[in-house]
Every structure is written in structure tokens, then in C-alpha cells.
Image (spheres, rainbow, N blue to C red):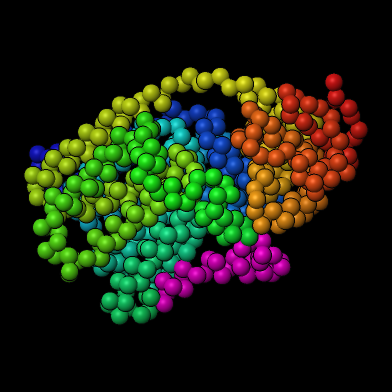
């Protein structure tokens, strides 16, 4: 429709109908393939946090401390559970799809401001087509889902101010709160949030809009001030900074978690291998990247002639794209879900340059965009296969979960030493220690003493009934790299004093707290 009627002006009602049809198709394509199983271990991390929040009476403390320093990643799942949704993988994927729906709607608003309704529908359909038949690794709920929604909403609010769609200090303050909260969904959001806030402040300064500048700045710092006051009232400010800042600083800027040197993380070879060489998204990313390279060149005369007057959207979208690439590559870990950060900034960048391209360039570019989306969809159809490869670990999971369910009540906290977060989700038991995985103790980090004290405090306060040693090779995630509990002296001594070994299941050791009735299940 766009290629044959590119000059046609579409009414707001027509655009709304098309958007509704797009989103209905996405939901219709995704709902039949929802599966209640773990596709990404991180989903289990967030679901385990929900179980803990729903269990412990101090909800805010648990939300801030039992969520791997990403409370706004977990909060949508918590809200879903409060509305009656079960705490499982199907519910998590549905909530992720709701957040993607919000992202698509925000993307439409952004592209409409930059390029008009007709072109914005094309760009939005490109993303909707990708989301409709998406790889299960991307579909599994993760921290990127809410992060991308929040970042996209922040960008939409910035551009709406730039194009004079709002002037209220209340909106400015709310926008500041949104941008200031980004780090509580994921630390990698910080650069994109800072960029959006800086450009919004600059746009306000150009208009001498001092009142909105003050409201925006106050909103940006308010979340962190409130969180620090909350921790300060408990004498735990150091816990906040260690877990929310220094932990992710070391994760991002050192080789503690990834052995890849910092310089190699941004090398062209890694970009090609990690971003483009993957059937899950490679065709779509390659299509968007090709357009992002070609369109500024093909439309150079058109956009450069007015650049001095209208430079801000061009510079902003370019920097946003660079920072999204930075967010994907910076940690040195090749986690597929990091690539979710790329799609929206690439689409915004392309929409802006399509808006200043000649009609002939625009038609070919739109054709290439939709062709790439269709090819990616065809490739992604293979991920809809219901067959799941056999994994011996699943058999062990069933045995361990069976033991936990048999010898504990639903309200009894459990500790799993290792990186096997799905055990708590399958058993539907709250975690007894604030980190559902314990690989941190294996790192050469100055924060290990702090994590050790947190462990001892939680164990004494929560008194978990069962302690599971799951950090064994070929069972725990990266179990061959990380330490078992008896290799950490303080933890070994605590477990020795307070727990007794009652069973070993295929190498997984299960300990009961000594206050429990004495039973021996050793074979």
C-alpha cells in the first residue's frame, strides 16, 4: 500500500485501525506457541524473585534486594501475579508481549513525528512482523523487555517535546522519573537514558524553558534519592551502592565475568560474529544495518542542506544507535537477548532518513525492509517446532524438585547453591538467600566479603529448610567454572554447623537444616 500510494495522507482513524490489526496479528501468531518451560535461565531468575516478593512480608525491601538489582524488570511479573497470573514461564512471556505491544505503540508515535503516519506504519509493521514469529530466546521474558519499552517511551517523550506536543512541568517531571528509573530495570540502559535526558535538557535550554528543566532534573534524580533514603533508614546505603553500582561496574568494565579483553569486545570480527551471524535475527539486523548505511549516503544532499537548522534529531538518533550497539557489546558476553536493544534504534534512525529521501529511494528502501522482514520470518518459522531436545538435566531437576516439594511447605525458603534458577520456579518455593544464583562467590571481586555477609545475614534471618548443592559440571549453568559451596570457607562452615546431608541425587547434594526433624535418606 505504501509503495503504490506513498503520497496518500492517512487519517488518524485509518492509522489506528491498521495498528490494531498489526497488534492483533502479532498476538494471534504468538499465543498458540506459548510454552510453560524455561528457554532462558534469566526468566527463572525473575520468576524466583516474584516468589520471594510474594512470600516475605517486607515487600519493598525484597523487591530491591532479591531481584539481582533489577527491581523494574521483576515488577511487571509481580504485578501480574497480584492480578492472579500464575508465576510461570507462560505468564512471563505474556507479560513480555504486553511490554512489546507498548514498545510498538511508542515506536509508531516516534516514527509518526519523524516521518508521518504512512511511513510510520511501515516501520512499525517491520517490527511487528519480526515479533510475530520470534525466536524463543527473544520471546523468553528478560530484562530487555521492560528496558526497551522504557527507553522507547523516553525517546517518544523527548521528540514530542521537541516537536512541541507538550509543555507541562508535570510531564517533564514524569519524564525525568522515567529516565531516572532506567537503571533499575537494567544497568546497560544508563547511557541511553543519559543521552535522552541530556538532549531533552538541551531542547528546553534552547527555548529558555527553565521551569521544565528544573522539573525534568528533579524527576531524574528523585528515584535514586528515594532509594538511598530507604537504604539509609536501615543503615544499608553501602548495600545499595555495592549491588546496584559497583557490581555492574565490575561486570561491565572488567574481565571478572567475561575473560574477553575490553578492546576485543568492540572489534569488527566480534560484531560480525555476534550481531549478524545468527539465524534468530541475522537477516533482519543485516537488512536494518544495510539501510542505516545506505540511506544517509543516498539522501545526503537532502538532509545536509537543512542540518544546521534541524540538527538535533539527526545527531540524537545517530548517538542512540551507537549507544544501543555499545549496550550489546560492552559486557563481552554473547547473550542473544542483548541484541534486542538494536531493533528500535535502527528503525528510528532509518525512519528519519527515509523521511528526507527521494520518493524513488524510499520505495526501494521500504521494499528491502519488508523483504528482509519476510525472509527473517521464514527463517524463524523453525523455532515454532514444538519438539524439545532431550536434556539429561531435566531428569535431575524432577528428582530434586520432587524432594523439595515432599519435605517442605510452599512457604519454606530454599537455597540453591549454583546457577540452576529453574529449580525454585518448578518447586514454587521462595529463595532463602537474596541471589538465586551464587556464581558471584567464584569471582575475583572486592565485593565478595560484602556478598558473604549478605549470605550469612539472609541465612540467619530466613533459615532456609533445604540447602541444595547444585554447582556441579554438566548440571549447573557453567558449573565447570564456578566454586561449590565447600570451596568457600565461610559458607562451608555455616552449612556444616546448621545443615546435614540427607541425600545425593545424581551428584546433587541435598542438605536439611538441623532444626528440622531428623531423617536420613542417604543411600
Q: Whole-percent x and y of residue 21? A: 28, 38
Extreme right residue here?
518
In the rendered image, which quarter contains the N terminus? top left
Nearest to the observer: residue 515 or residue 98: 515
Q: Whole-percent x and y of residue 42? A: 55, 40
Query: Is residue 228 magenta-colored?
Result: yes
Displayed quadrant of residue 51: top right
Is residue 28 visible in this depiction of the protein? no
Q: Is residue 122 above or below residue 480?
A: below
Q: Residue at x 48, y 40 (%)?
A: 335
Is residue 522 visible in this depiction of the protein? yes
Q: In this view, does 242 lie to the left or right of 382?
A: right
Nearest to the observer: residue 26 or residue 518: 518
Q: Residue at x 32, y 72 (%)?
A: 202
Q: Main secondary structure of the magenta part?
A: helix
Q: In this view, does 510 lie to the left or right of 222?
A: right
Q: Residue at x 18, y 49 (%)?
A: 295
Q: Whole-percent x and y of residue 508? A: 73, 29
Residues in magenta, as a range: 214-241
Q: Whole-percent x and y of residue 289? A: 27, 44
Q: In this view, does 338 lie to the left or right of 157?
A: right
In the rendered image, which quarter contains the C terminus? top right
Q: Which residue is drawn at 38% across and 33% down?
A: 278
Nearest to the observer: residue 297 or residue 307: 297
Query: Is residue 382 magenta-colored?
Result: no
Q: In this view, does 32 lie above or below 187?
A: above
Displayed quadrant of residue 41: top right
Q: In this view, does 317 lie to the left or right of 456?
A: left
Amino acid at each position: 500500500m505504501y509503495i503504490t500510494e506513498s503520497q496518500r495522507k492517512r487519517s488518524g482513524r485509518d492509522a489506528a485501525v491498521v495498528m490494531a490489526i498489526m497488534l492483533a496479528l502479532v498476538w494471534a501468531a504468538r499465543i498458540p506457541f506459548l510454552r510453560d518451560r524455561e528457554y532462558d535461565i534469566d526468566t527463572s531468575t525473575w520468576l524466583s524473585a516474584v516468589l520471594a516478593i510474594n512470600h516475605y512480608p517486607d515487600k519493598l525491601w525484597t523487591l530491591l534486594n532479591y531481584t539481582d538489582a533489577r527491581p523494574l524488570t521483576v515488577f511487571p511479573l509481580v504485578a501480574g501475579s497480584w492480578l492472579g497470573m500464575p508465576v510461570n514461564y507462560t505468564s512471563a512471556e505474556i507479560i513480555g508481549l504486553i511490554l512489546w505491544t507498548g514498545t510498538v505503540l511508542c515506536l509508531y508515535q516516534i516514527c509518526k513525528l519523524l516521518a508521518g503516519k504512512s511511513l510510520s506504519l511501515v516501520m512499525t509493521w517491520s517490527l511487528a512482523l519480526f515479533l510475530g514469529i520470534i525466536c524463543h530466546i527473544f520471546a523468553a521474558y528478560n530484562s530487555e523487555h521492560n528496558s526497551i519499552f522504557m527507553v522507547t517511551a523516553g525517546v517518544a517523550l523527548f521528540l514530542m517535546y521537541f516537536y512541541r506536543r507538550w509543555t507541562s512541568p508535570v510531564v517533564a517531571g514524569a519524564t525525568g522519573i522515567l529516565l531516572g528509573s532506567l537503571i533499575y530495570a537494567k544497568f546497560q540502559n544508563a547511557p541511553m537514558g543519559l543521552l535522552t535526558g541530556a538532549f531533552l535538557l538541551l531542547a528546553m535550554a534552547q527555548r529558555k524553558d527553565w521551569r521544565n528543566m528544573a522539573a525534568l532534573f528533579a524527576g531524574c534524580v528523585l528515584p535514586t534519592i528515594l532509594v538511598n533514603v530507604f537504604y539509609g533508614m536501615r543503615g544499608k546505603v553501602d548495600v545499595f551502592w555495592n549491588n546496584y553500582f559497583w557490581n555492574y561496574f565490575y561486570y561491565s568494565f572488567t574481565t571478572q565475568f567475561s575473560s574477553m579483553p575490553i578492546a576485543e569486545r568492540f572489534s569488527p570480527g566480534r560484531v560480525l560474529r555476534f550481531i549478524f551471524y545468527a539465524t534468530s535475527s541475522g537477516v533482519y539486523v543485516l537488512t536494518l544495518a544495510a539501510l542505516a548505511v545506505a540511506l544517509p549516503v543516498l539522501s545526503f544532499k537532502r538532509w545536509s542542506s537543512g542540518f544546521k537548522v534541524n540538527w538535533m534529531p539527526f545527531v540524537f538518533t545517530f548517538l542512540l544507535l551507537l549507544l544501543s550497539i555499545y549496550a550489546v557489546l560492552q559486557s563481552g558476553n554473547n547473550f542473544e537477548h542483548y541484541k534486542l536493544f538494536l531493533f528500535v534504534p535502527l528503525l528510528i534512525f532509518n525512519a528519519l532518513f527515509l523521511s528526507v529521501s527521494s520518493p524513488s529511494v524510499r520505495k526501494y528502501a521500504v521494499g528491502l525492509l519488508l523483504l528482509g522482514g519476510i525472509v527473517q520470518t521464514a527463517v524463524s518459522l523453525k523455532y515454532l517446532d514444538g519438539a524439545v531436545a532431550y536434556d539429561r538435566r531435566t531428569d535431575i531437576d524432577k528428582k530434586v524438585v520432587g524432594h523439595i516439594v515432599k519435605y517442605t511447605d510452599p512457604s519454606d525458603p530454599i537455597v540453591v547453591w549454583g546457577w540452576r534458577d529453574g529449580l525454585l520456579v518448578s518447586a514454587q518455593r521462595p529463595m532463602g538467600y537474596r541471589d538465586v544464583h551464587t556464581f558471584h562467590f567464584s569471582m575475583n571481586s572486592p565485593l565478595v566479603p560484602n556478598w558473604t555477609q549478605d549470605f550469612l545475614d539472609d541465612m540467619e534471618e530466613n533459615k532456609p529448610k533445604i540447602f541444595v548443592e547444585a554447582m556441579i559440571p554438566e548440571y549447573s549453568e557453567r558449573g565447570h567454572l564456578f566454586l561449590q559451596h565447600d570451596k568457600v570457607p565461610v559458607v562451608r562452615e555455616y552449612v556444616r554447623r546448621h545443615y546435614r546431608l540427607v541425600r545425593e541425587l545424581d551428584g546433587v547434594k541435598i542438605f536439611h537444616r538441623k532444626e528440622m526433624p531428623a531423617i536420613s535418606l542417604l543411600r
